[in-house]
Amino acid sequence: MSGDDRGGGPPALPGAVPLHVGGVAPVEPPQGRVEPPRGRAGAGPRSPARAGGARRSTRRGLLRLRAALLLLTALACGSVTWSFAATTATATSVREHAAPAVLQAATARHALADTHLEAVTVLAAAVRDARDGTAPALTLLTGPGEEYEKRLALAGQYLNQVAEDNVAGPTASARIQLSVELISAYAGWIGQAGAHLHRDPAGLLGPTDLWYASRVLTTPDSGVLRHLDALLTDQRTALDALLAATTTTASGTLALLLPVLALAALLVVAQARLSRRFRRTWNPPLLAATALTTALAGLALWGAHTQARVEAASADVVAVADGWQRRTDDATARARAELLAMLGPGCVDACGPTVAEVAGVDPPAGAATLEKGADLTDRALTARTELADADHGAWTPLGPLCGALLAALVLLGLHPRLDEHRFRPR
């Protein structure tokens, strides 16, 4: 008996797969390269669809960044240009019209008061000398004299200049016209007083005419000086309104700089983002745009400084006008005292309530501290020179130029990156 017969099993067939206990065949090891499992993030190369989606997402981000930069550029340059143009326009208006109108109104009022003082002084002295028999007839024949004529003509010139530079509207123009007519009436009374005093130095007609001339000039409610005082107030109010329209405060300057600062910050963020995303350290156009933003902030601060200079010079102009006002009040008080002395002490009680009222007016305070006319003239010249130096209207186009350059640099800096991520159909 063979060994197979002893084992009790059937003989093995050629090519048959051997069976093992339990009927399970052994697992053969896989042949060839093992494929990694799918579905995990970051495994394997990206599909063309995924690559196109990433490109479109990057492009949308760059487009939003460009739109934000251009919008902030327009806002920053527009606000700075508007502010600088408004400030320079204010400086020009103050220099060419408002400040001269204030100064001329104050000097016209003082010149008229000085004219009246000259007339009263000369005529009163001539009356006293004629009554004493010591004055030649020629003194009264010529009236108040050439100095009076010069000062009266000077006051008229000042008023004409106020009319040319008037910034207070038609109300001020009407006051100027009324003042000119009252000055003509005043000059008529003065001429008539001189004629009467020439014919009868000791009579009452001459002093009466001089009194009426004084009332035309100094009546508290309707005199020429009162109208000129209101004219000066109108011009000062217009000057204040001009300055208030472009006044500079810390909060206003900060609000003006906010768009500029936001633009600078976004440019820095854009530079950092592009450097990280595209592995490029610097973007020269965006760096140049950042530097230009600094120049734009400097232009805004320059405008604020210009406004401060204009306000300081305008304050000097107002101070000079106040100085002329004090000199005007002093000249009016001296003329009133001279006129009352000519009328005589008995006239205060015998000539009616108007004379008594005039005699009871208190002299102006601070007459001992009056500034000299030459000093006031020098201060006015200094203030007007400062206003001329603060007029930078020729630099106004710098704002739009900065805006155009900024926009060009932003487009130039982002265009290559946008071109890299342009959508390309498969």
Image (tube, rainbow, N blue to C red):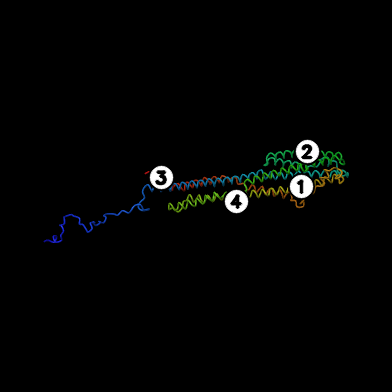
Under tag 1, what secondary structure? helix
Left or right, 383 with reference to 4: right
How far, Cα to Cα, is label 3 from label 2?
Answer: 88 Å
Find residue 313 and report its horizontal and vertical position in percent.
Answer: 66, 49
In this view, the residue in front, 371 or 345, is 345
Query: Mark 1 or mark 3, which has the lower sequence index?
Result: 1
Q: Which residue carries the number 2 mark?
A: 185
Q: Disc 1, disc 4: CB below 8 Å?
A: no
Find residue 35 and report its horizontal and vertical position in percent.
Answer: 31, 53
* Front position among marks 1 and 4: 4
Left or right, 110 with reference to 294: right
Left or right, 344 with reference to 417: right
* Front position among marks 2 and 4: 4
Dot 3 amino acid type: Phe
Q: Which residue carries the number 1 mark?
A: 329
In this view, the residue in front, 229 or 24, is 24
How far, Cα to Cα, is label 1 from label 4?
Answer: 41 Å
Left or right, 331 with reference to 266: right
Crowding near the residue tagged with mark 4, few <14, some 14–19, many ≥20 C-alpha atoms within 10 Å: few
Dot 1 amino acid type: Asp
Under tag 3, what secondary structure? loop
Q: Which residue carries the number 3 mark?
A: 423
Find residue 368 and report its horizontal and vertical position in percent.
Answer: 77, 52
Under tag 4, what secondary structure? helix
